[in-house]
Image (cartoon, rainbow, N blue to C red):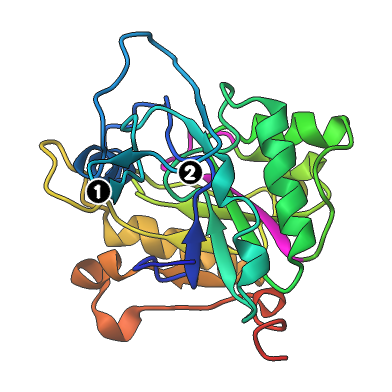
Amino acid sequence: MQKTKIEWCDSTWNPVPGCFHECEYCYARKIAKRFSGASETDAEGTLHDLENAAVMGFKKAPYPFEFEPTFHRYRLKQPKGWKKPQNIFVCSMGDLFGEWVPDEWIDAVFKDCEEAPQHNYLFLTKNPGRYMMLEKTGKLPHRGNMWFGSTVTGPHDFYLWMRDVVAHCFLSVEPIHAPLGKMNVDSEKPEWVIIGAESGNRIGKIIPQKAWIYELTRECDKYGIPVFMKNSLVPILGNDNMRREIPKALTWQKER
């Protein structure tokens, strides 16, 4: 188990860290580079598969290939050993549903989740079309403790996938870079919306406007969608205007 500062989950589990999206605001890439144990390979688009933890010197290297996607098979079965029910953010340091990830890797992660049903599992991707592909082939689990989310930064991002996926769905609007506009509840009703601003001091960093945030929360309120605002919004909205709502379905197991 890896404790985390991410406010909307209890812990993170990273059997497949790494990503090829090249998002300029990505915090995970910086962390992976900082704690890498080896240099990147020369081959573009390289995937790595490890049966055992990589060791550099006397320490384990959590990201031995920096941010290149790597299946750490030895991290499978970890959730089964965590007895206390938790909300687990799966692959917080990568995108498990990136187009480069083999189906076999995804299947193995799903299998481990199913073997530890005491937890809730939250997935996030910038490639929600993969959810639709898995749904059509019968490979997307329809379990009440699995939540499938999509990262959205503005109205151009694709999130109509929810009308074709029979599962818990949510949106992570982080970082919010533009107003999202109105929701079409007939085709896209998330069960939860998380909102956050870009962190760090990147040149060109976009500071969200209050109007963008309030427009989105009004849309959520219209359809009874819980809203969770991350601490990165405090400087913009102030503490008194923060909302940290969590769906009941994500609390029942923890209350048992």
Q: Are marks 2 and 1 in contact (CB under 8 Å)?
A: no
Q: Can residue 199 be seen in this snapshot?
A: yes
**C-alpha gap between disc 2 and disc 1:** 40 Å
State whether residue 85 is above or below residue 32. Answer: below
Residue sitting at x 73%, y 48%: 110
Q: Is residue 130 left or right of residue 144?
A: left
Q: Is residue 172 left or right of residue 4?
A: right
- The location of residue 8, given as percent across then percent down, is 47, 69
The front one of 194 and 125 is 125
Helix, strand or loop under label 1: loop
Q: Amino acid at mark 1?
A: Phe
The front one of 67 and 248 is 67
Q: Earlier in the sequence, mark 2 or mark 1?
A: 1
Q: Amino acid at mark 2?
A: Val
State whether residue 162 is above or below residue 49. Answer: below
Q: Is residue 236 left or right of residue 44?
A: left
Q: Residue furthest right?
A: 138
Residue sitting at x 30%, y 70%: 231
Q: What residue did someone put label 1 on?
A: 58
Q: What residue did someone put label 2 on?
A: 152
The front one of 137 and 201 is 137
The mark lying in front, picked from 2 and 1, is: 1
State whether residue 255 is above or below residue 94. Answer: below
Image quadrant in which the C terminus is located: bottom right
- The location of residue 148, given as percent across then percent down, is 66, 51
Q: Residue furthest front?
A: 58
- The location of residue 155, given as percent across then percent down, is 48, 38
Query: Where are the magenta residues, as a range?
Result: 145-158
